[in-house]
Amino acid sequence: MYNFRTDLALERREILGRIKKDAEKIDGIDVEEKDVNEKIKVSRVKITNENGEQAIGKPKGTYVTIDIKKLKIATDEEIEESANVLRDELKELVNIHVDSLADVLVVGLGNEYITPDSLGPKVISNIEVTRHIIKYLPEYALEGTRPISAISPGVLGTTGIETLEILEGIVNNVKPKLLIVIDALASRSIERISSTIQLSDTGIVPGAGVGNTRKELSINTLGIPVIALGIPTVVESAVLVNEALDLFIGKLQEEARSNDYLNELKEQDNYEEIKEALNPRRLQYDSYSKRN
């Protein structure tokens, strides 16, 4: 199996398409795409059999990717629209596995003291938990309120306990019907950092995208459905170098530079040229700042 170095099923499918000419005909992988608007795109990768599993190294199930263009400079209205798309997609996945009143445990994975790994714990601090209210103060709970509990179990390096071991104890005692696990992901694209959301109903293997694989959290290990929600926060240094080179080469091609010029580049400091080639991305933010 190819070493994809990304947690996103859609990216794995895209990479497979580049390295195999007949990748679109692979049995067991179905892809559906729709544009919500000019900035939001929803893609569904469905892995339906073992052949699909082996091709991209992901278990059978549904993987929903929400790509949001220029989310970092989006308006409040655009952010709210993106949140509504996420809400609808998450609700659809949850409703497939449990009813509207089933207990749900939300789990925030990661280390809150390390910025790119702190997504899970930060989300947990903003979850509106209701399980205790329904249990101890039912008169204050609105009719139809779902029991929600939440936990941020930390990481092996600070607790000395595998996340799976912690969650096994919680599941056995609290007895939720479904887990929603939130974690930071690895991507193969700078553009997807903090601008893409992946949902899946296959669970998650923490650390898989960066080569620090822990025990999987899934229906196979916990006995209940596990929905994973993740956002890419890291890329490999090789990705940064590759995308910078693509931009730099593209700029040279636009200027129709000769081979003699390229040979001269080997003999000088190219910092300014590379900086100028990378400027278009920064200009997006500059133009936004001027408008606001």
Image: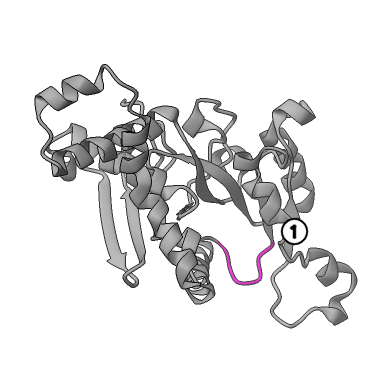
Let me know if residue 242 is in the magenta part.
Answer: no
* Residue position for label 1: 149
Residue at 46% of width from left, 61% of height from top? 71
- Determine the main secondary structure of the stretch shown in magenta: loop
Q: Is residue 249 left or right of residue 53?
A: left
In the foreground, 265 or 164? 265
Residue at 53% of width from left, 45% of height from top? 203
Q: Relative to 2, does residue 178 appear above or below in the rendering?
A: below
> Percent from the top left, x then y, of residue 150?
73, 55
Position of the N terminus, as image quadrant, is top left
Q: Total marks drawn? A: 1
Q: Is residue 211 left or right of residue 36?
A: right
> Percent from the top left, x then y, of residue 5?
41, 31
Residue at 69% of width from left, 52% of height from top? 122
Dividing the picture into quarters, in which one does residue 36 lie? bottom left
> Percent from the top left, x then y, of residue 98?
57, 63
The kind of secondary structure element at disc 1 is strand
> Which residues make up the magenta segment?
98-103
Residue 199 is at least partly visible in this image:
yes
What amino acid type should be assigned to the residue bearing mark 1? Answer: Ser
Q: Relative to 18, does residue 99 appear above or below in the rendering?
A: below
In the foreground, 25 or 39? 39
> Percent from the top left, x then y, of residue 7?
44, 39
Residue 62 is at least partly visible in this image:
no
- In the picture as drawn, the residue positioned furthest to the top comes out as 267
Q: Is residue 280 left or right of residue 205?
A: left
Dividing the picture into quarters, in which one does residue 178 lie? bottom right
Residue count near mark 1 (Cα–Cα under 10 Å), binned few <14, some 14–19, many ≥20: many
Q: Relative to 170, does residue 136 appear above or below in the rendering?
A: below
In the foreground, 67 or 32? 67
